[in-house]
Amino acid sequence: MNFDPVRRRSLGLLFALPLVAAARRGAAQAARVVPIIDAHAHPTRSSRNLNDGVRTALALMDQLGAKMTILSPPPFPESERGMYGNSDLRDVARAHAGRFAFTAGGESLNPMIQQIAPDRITPDILSRFQREAEGIAQSGAAGFGEIAAEHFSNRMGRHPYESSPPDHPLFLALADISAKYGMPIELHMEAVPQDMPFPPARSGPPNPATLKENISAFERLLDHNSKARIVWLHAGWDLSGERTVKLMRSLLERHANLFMSVKSDHSGVRLNAPFLPDGTVKPAWVAMLRAFPDRFIIGSDQFFDEAPERLERARKLVDGLPADLAPLVASGNVSRIYRLAA
């Protein structure tokens, strides 16, 4: 069947109009997406070759609206000291200025804290620790991380159990250096508000039978230097079953230098996660964020050589927050907490 040219143009416009309208709706929707600064993620789980992880990170960041990511080494144990850290992540941040910043110390400061008991600290050890921390500060790092106070062993055997009291003399020394340079300490610590059996679902041969209470020592760290900003990592991803909204709120009320980054994945205790079963953000979490709107940030803990569940959930959290809170939690608070280049 033949159509005259005028009729063909009319039909073309008829079919094109819905596509144009859909494109405009998509552009408008994209414009409303609140950009994220992910304050805590890892390029890879353990590999020293970071190139693949960085490429994956950039693609995933573009897909999910993360304009910047602060990369961190995990809290490596002594057996994996220096797997990647300060110099590696500094080079990544320099090569991709504006997309990445970095923290360091998980590869160097953390093994020292884990290996040396609090009562075995000598002036020489303290001086060596301080020199390492000063070197990280002078390298341009945005903070010190990731440092462990209570780190459960990974269920797949990729990370051993680590435990050190949060008021360890080296933690206190790091707090003073943190205050001096305006760099936060990223602390990985499962909440243990009283002595308790190790959670059965997490237990295994490398883990202790009993966990020692750590909140009082954590508060001593917070009180040691009020100018030291402490970011308690992984709010919303609770493995002890004790990091409740009530506990977090009580600590935030007592310590103005305490901040928290939010993480979510399927392995945390659901009772203390930020989402309801239908995927909406729990009212108690919204109320906590509204009570402390300048104290929470996104810290997905995404490993970019693994499935992107954690960053996807970070996007879901931001999209589910009220309009007045989302920009603060997503990105607005990060530059006040971390030492980022202007």
Image (cartoon, rainbow, N blue to C red):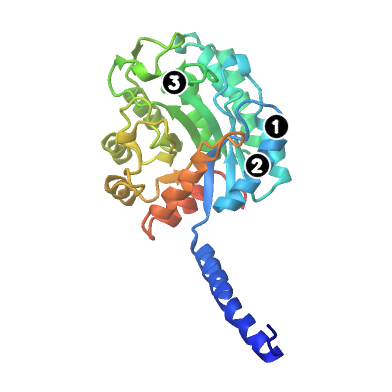
Please tell me which residue is depicted at 67% across the width and 35% down the height of the picture. Answer: 89
User: Residue 20's spot in the image, x, y percent?
Assistant: 58, 75
**Relative to 45, 265 lies left or right:** left
**Dividing the image into 4 quarters, which one contains the N terminus?**
bottom right
Q: Earlier in the sequence, mark 2 or mark 3?
A: 2
Crowding at mark 1 (Cα within 10 Å: few <14, some 14-19, many 20+): some
Badge nearest the viewer, 2 or 3: 2
The kind of residue on which mark 3 rests is Phe
**Residue type indicated by callout 2:** Thr
**Whether residue 333 is visible:** no
Name the kind of residue labelled 1 in the image: Ser
Q: How far apart are marks 2 and 1 (CA)?
A: 20 Å
Residue at image location 41% in from the left, 19% down from the top: 165
Q: Can residue 267 be seen in this view?
A: yes
Please determine whether, in this image, residue 130 is positioned above or below residue 288: above
x%, y% of residue 174? 51, 27
The image shows residue 69 at horizontal and vertical percentages of: 58, 44
Q: Name the residue under label 3.
A: 152
At 44% from the left and 49% from the top, the residue drawn is 316
Which mark identifies residue 87? Answer: 1
Q: Which of 26 and 189 is in front in this view?
A: 26
Rendered view: 28 above or below 123: below
Viewer-nearest residue: 107 or 280: 280
Q: Nearer the viewer, mark 2 or mark 1?
A: 2
Instruction: Provide the residue designation for mark 2.
Output: 56
